[in-house]
Image: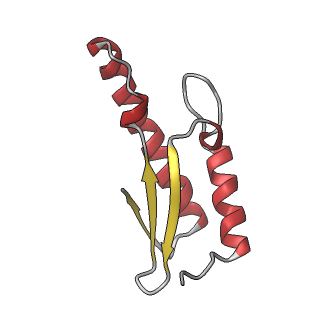
Amino acid sequence: MPKTMDPEMTRKIAAILDRVKDPESGLGLDRLGIIERVRYNEEKQQMYIFTNFLGHLPNCPSCSGIALALMSTIQRNLAEEFKKEFPELGIEFV
């Protein structure tokens, strides 16, 4: 049976997802459905962030290029915020 995540860690993750904003809408990632789940491997000291950026890509090729650039910015900002809160952990996007 998987162990539940520490409540303080859960609170910090929720704060990160609220703090990191989508550059276009200004909404926190917690409201956009981009982050599907976050897992922590205590043994490996690794945080895994499961994302669904591709499910949000527009069909227009030009628009997709812009969306990919925005996704890259969001992912970079998210990684920075996770490293601030959890400097001892490795961060990996899945």
Q: Quadrant of the C terminus?
A: bottom left
Left or right for 94, reference 49: left
Quadrant hosting residue 91: bottom left
Left or right for 5, reference 40: right
78 vs 11, nearest the viewer: 11
32 vs 16, nearest the viewer: 32
Q: Quadrant of the N terminus?
A: bottom right
Left or right for 31, reference 71: right
Q: Residue 41: percent from the left, percent from the top?
A: 46, 78
User: Colour scheme used in the picture?
Assistant: secondary structure
Quadrant hosting residue 71: top left
- Residue at left 54%, top 81%? 2
Question: In the displayed image of the protein, which residue is found farthest to the front?
Answer: 1
Q: Residue 28: percent from the left, percent from the top?
A: 64, 38
- Residue at left 40%, top 82%? 44
- Residue at left 50%, top 67%? 39
Question: In the displayed image of the protein, which residue is found farthest to the left?
Answer: 61
Judge whether 89 appears above or below 51 on screen.
Answer: below
- Residue at left 63%, top 77%? 4
Q: Residue 48: percent from the left, percent from the top?
A: 44, 64
Tally of numbered tags: 0
Q: Residue 59: percent from the left, percent from the top?
A: 33, 16
Left or right for 63, reference 17: left
Judge whether 32 appears above or below 24 on screen.
Answer: below
Judge whether 61 appears above or below 56 on screen.
Answer: above
